[in-house]
Image (tube, rainbow, N blue to C red):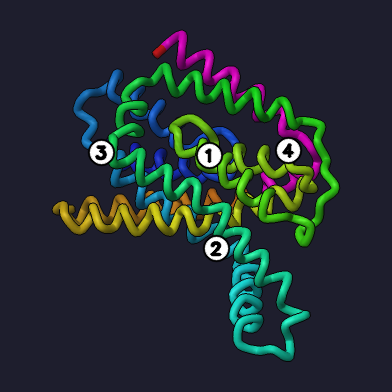
Amino acid sequence: MINLITYIFLGLLQGITEPIPVSSSGHILILQTILKNLNQSINVDFETLAVITNFGSLIAIVIIYWNDIVKLIKDFFSYIFTKETRKDTKKGYLYSWKLVVATIPAGIFGIIATKIDLLETLEKNIKFIGITLIITSIFLFLIRNFKGKKSKDQISFKDSIIIGLYQMVSVIPGISRSGATIVGGMFQGLKREEAFNFSFLLYIPISIATTILGVKDLIEISISSTTWILYIISAIIAGIFTYIFTKWFAKIVKEGKLIYFSIYCLIIGLLVIILL
C-alpha cells in the first residue's frame, strides 16, 4: 500500500511541478530524500518512474499544443516542397528551425553530463538542490515586472540560441526548465505569452529525447506486471495534472505573477539547505 501511495503521489508531484517554474526534478529528489529518511523499506525505482511520469507530462503538453504542432509541421514541409505557398508558410518554417536550434545546447550538454556522470553526482547532494532552487528564485524575481514587446514572428535565431542556453542550464537538478526558458525569453524581450509558448513547445523535443533514452534503459531491466500497472497509474496522474497546471500557469504568466513562484522556490531552497 505504501508503494501505491508513493507512485500516486509522485505522479501528482510530477504533474504539478513539471509546467510551473519550481523544478520537477528538484522536488522529486527532495521527496526521495524525505521518504528514505522516513522509511528505508520503500521500494520505488525513482529514476525509472521519473522517465514514465515525464512521458505522461509530454502527452499532456502535446495535447495542449496539438494544433500548433500540426501547423508547424505542415508549414515546414509545405515551405520545402510547395513553392506556390512559400510566403504563407515561411514563418512557420523559420519558427520550427528556431525550436530546433534552441534544443541543441541542452541536448549536447545532456549527453556530456551523462557521459561524465555529472548529473548523478549532483543529485546525490541534496543541499545543492536547495542552492539551485534559490538560483531559480533569483531569476524569477529579476523578471517579475518584464513584459517584452517581441511577437512570435520577431523571435530571432540569436534569441533561440540564448533561450537554448538557458534550457541547457536547466539540465542541472533544481533549475526549473520552464522557469529558465521563460526567463531567457523574457530577457530577450519576448512578450510574456510568447516566452511561455516558446518554452513549452521547446519542452516537447527535449522530452521526447529523454523518453527515448529512458525506454532504452527500460528494455534492459525486468519489470513485473504489478509494477507496470503502478507506473501507468502514475503516468496518467502526471498527465492529467500537467494539463491542468499548464493551463493555469499560462494565466499566471500572462498576469505577470511569477513573483509567487520566486518566493516559493526561495522558501523551499532554504528549508532544504537547513533541514535535509
Q: Are marks 2 and 1 in contact (CB under 8 Å)?
A: no
Q: What is the quadrant of residue 154 in the picture?
A: bottom right
Q: Amino acid at mark 3?
A: Val
| Numbered disc 3: secondary structure | loop
Closer to the eye: label 2 or 4: 4
Residue 98, above or below 267: below
Q: Amino acid at mark 1?
A: Thr
Q: Amino acid at mark 2?
A: Val
| Numbered disc 2: secondary structure | helix
Residue range of the region highlighted in magenta in the rendering: 248-275
> What residue is shown at x 67% (from left), y 44% (from top)?
249
Q: Are marks 4 and 3 in contact (CB under 8 Å)?
A: no
Residue 256: give x, y in percent of width and height: 79, 37
Q: Which residue is mark 4?
A: 187
First reached walking from the N terminus: tag 1 or tag 4: 1
Confirm whether the magenta stretch covers residue 69. Answer: no
State the separation of the CA atoms marked 2 and 4: 26 Å
Q: Which residue is mark 3?
A: 44
Along the line of sight, the residue nearer the viewer: 129 or 14:
129
> What residue is shown at x 34% (from left), y 24% (from top)?
33
First reached walking from the N terminus: tag 4 or tag 3: 3
